[in-house]
Amino acid sequence: MIITEKPNRSGSINAKFEETYSVTYQVLTDSIAYPADVVAFVGINIGDAYDSGNACCININPKQVSDDGKTWDIDYHYGKREPMPSDPTQEPARIVESVEHLEKPYDEDRDGVAITNSAGMPFLDHVMGDDSRPTIHIEKNSWTWNRNGFLKYRDVINKGTWWGFENNTLKVQDIGSERIWSEEFDQYYYKIHLELAYDPKYKWAKRVLDCGLMQWNPFVEKLENILDDNGVGYITEPVPLDGAGKALPKAPPIKYEFLTFNIYNEMDFSVFNWMLT
């Protein structure tokens, strides 16, 4: 084959300083050829840079110019390089920190003193108060979504320090995904979201005032009803207990006891490390 550049180069620059060029090569072959053959022989491909380096090959147009199929003109057009499709999974994580406004029942005040009536008895209805919790919302794209693997982390607290947060201070409030179609890559990807709540004070342990209608008798090792003030009947409303199952004396000062329960499972949160990038 013989390659000759035809003397018809052209070019232009627009107001945005975007350059375009056209170049034609003539290819003479020894036998009948096909478009792919002559294009491969010249060796210029889509995306190759023009001499200036400010434009790249965006179109190749081979044309047969002889009846015997041995002479071809190939027009090469150069212009602005189109950006490569952006991989959605390479986008940085979206992290939003805010406060969720909730209410919860309170058994103690800000100083740790039990909330009771003037007689030292628990209220029949809990005192409700605001429970504004710091939350962290994380979103990250992924080509895959391990539904069973992720959903087992619902209502789980962190085991060990993670992302600078102390052990047991974070709890998974919500976790899920949104399936999105990528036109550029012709496949689905997943926007995975993770919502965490922060409790540095109690570390998600539940504290309740120790009280009840019965008390523990260690001498006979069984529960027994608590007598009322007259000593002839039994109480009908809970009274504070001493943390060992015995009714507290009603004479002040009364030291109220709270029971602590760890009800949430703990797991290693390092499985979420990739979502922070």
Image: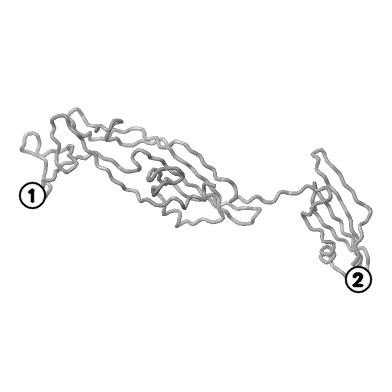
At x 60%, y 50%, the residue is 90
At x 35%, y 43%, the residue is 204
Q: Residue furthest bottom?
A: 31
- The quadrant holding residue 213 is top left
Residue corresponding to mark 2: 30
Q: Amino acid at mark 2?
A: Asp
- Asked which secondary structure carries label 2, the reply is loop
Q: Earlier in the sequence, mark 1 or mark 2?
A: 2
Q: Amino acid at mark 1?
A: Val
Question: In the rendered image, which quarter contains the N terminus?
Answer: bottom right
Q: CA distance from mark 1 to mark 2?
A: 113 Å
Q: Nearer the viewer, residue 20 or 34?
A: 20
In percent of width and height, residue 153 lies at 42, 52
**Where is 186 relative to 99, above or below?**
below
**Where is 53 relative to 66, above or below?**
above
- The quadrant holding residue 165 is top left
In percent of width and height, residue 202 lies at 33, 40
User: In the displayed structure, does residue 19 sit left or right of residue 137?
Assistant: right
Residue corresponding to mark 1: 220
In percent of width and height, residue 215 lies at 14, 43
CA neighbours of label 1 inside 10 A, class few (<14), some (14 to 19), many (20+): few
